[in-house]
């Protein structure tokens, strides 16, 4: 099909960021398992340190995926709310700019934590070997506080609010369209006291249910705990 429009570009970018996150996560899990067996674990560096350091790199791709999903949620709502101008707004170039901006912002958000850690050579007198170990500088507490505020509060709750608003806009416009079609077919004006959901049938009802399910999953996955900064 190719990258011919904004939808395919956003889905392609989402696939890359998801794959990158899963790849780093799989490597971290593999390193954790290897670290359980000291006889096969490398002596030149600590796998535990590598696992922890790579955590922050994986979160860059996690944030990219989250923000792209929010963008697709907004685009999906606008596709229903403003169908005539949708393609003129959510163009391929606009989506590319959005993906680049999202990627840059996600990396910039994590820079404070990445800049406060590194590896240095330390001589281990027990094994008589020089090893690379993870170190943190004095600015790490402040960087961790900034990351906590931005990621667990501003981004997490901001994205949830945007997704809920997009869901409301999508359902409202689908119900309005369904009421209009119902009125045209029945030849009568629908009452404002009637339950709007009664007009959703077939594909419209299926779309709303799927979007609600996806939104619930998104919200659950983005209510972050301290270990999911």
Image (spheres, rainbow, N blue to C red):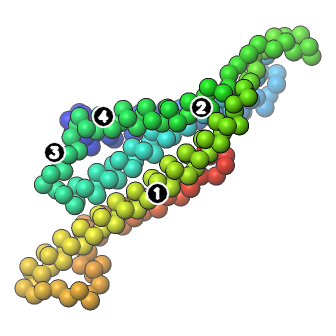
What residue is shown with label 4? 97
Mark 2 → mark 1, Cα distance in angstroms: 24 Å
Q: Is mark 4 on a helix, strand or loop?
A: helix
Q: Which of marks 3 and 2 is nearer the N terminus?
A: 3
Name the side, left or right, on which 57 lies relative to 208. right
Taking the spot 76% from the left edge, 13% from the top edge, the residue there is 121
Taking the spot 78% from the left edge, 32% from the top edge, the residue there is 36
Mark linked to residue 37: none
Quadrant showing the N terminus? top left
Q: Earlier in the sequence, mark 1 or mark 3?
A: 3
Mark linked to residue 88: 3
> Which of pointers 2 and 1 indicates the residue nearer the eye?
2
Residue 54, can we see it? Answer: no
* Image coords of residue 118 (percent x, y): 68, 22
* Image coords of residue 228 (percent x, y): 62, 46
Q: Kindly indicate whether the residue at mark 1 contacts the one at mark 2 (C-beta within 8 angstroms).
A: no
| Numbered disc total | 4
> Which of pointers 4 and 2 indicates the residue nearer the eye?
2
Name the side, left or right, on which 220 lies relative to 116. left
Corner quadrant of residue 135:
top right
Q: Earlier in the sequence, mark 2 or mark 1?
A: 2
Mark 3: give few (<14), some (14-19) or many (20+) Cα within 10 Å.
Answer: few
Q: What element carries label 1?
A: helix
What residue is shown with label 1? 160
Mark 4 → mark 2, Cα distance in angstroms: 24 Å
Q: Kindly indicate whether the residue at mark 2 contacts the one at mark 4 (C-beta within 8 angstroms).
A: no
């Amino acid at each position: 099909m190719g990258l011919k429009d904004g939808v395919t570009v956003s889905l392609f970018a989402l696939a890359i960021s998801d794959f990158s996150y899963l790849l780093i996560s799989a490597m971290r899990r593999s390193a954790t398992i290897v670290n359980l067996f000291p006889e096969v674990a490398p002596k030149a560096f600590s796998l535990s340190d590598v696992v922890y350091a790579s955590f922050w790199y994986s979160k860059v791709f996690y944030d990219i995926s989250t923000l792209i999903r929010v963008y697709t949620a907004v685009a999906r709502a606008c596709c229903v709310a403003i169908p005539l101008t949708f393609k003129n707004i959510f163009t391929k170039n606009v989506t590319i700019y959005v993906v680049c901006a999202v990627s840059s912002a996600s990396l910039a958000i994590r820079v404070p934590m990445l800049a406060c850690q590194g590896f240095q050579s330390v001589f281990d007198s027990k094994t008589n070997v020089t090893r690379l170990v993870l170190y943190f500088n004095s600015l790490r507490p402040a960087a961790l506080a900034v990351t906590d505020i931005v990621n667990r509060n501003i981004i997490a709750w901001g994205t949830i609010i945007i997704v809920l608003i997009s869901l409301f806009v999508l359902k409202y416009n689908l119900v309005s369209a369904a009421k209009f079609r119902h009125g045209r077919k029945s030849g009568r004006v629908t009452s404002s006291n009637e339950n709007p959901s009664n007009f959703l049938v077939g594909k419209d009802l299926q779309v709303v249910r799927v979007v609600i399910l996806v939104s619930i999953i998104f919200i659950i996955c983005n209510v972050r705990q301290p270990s999911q900064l």
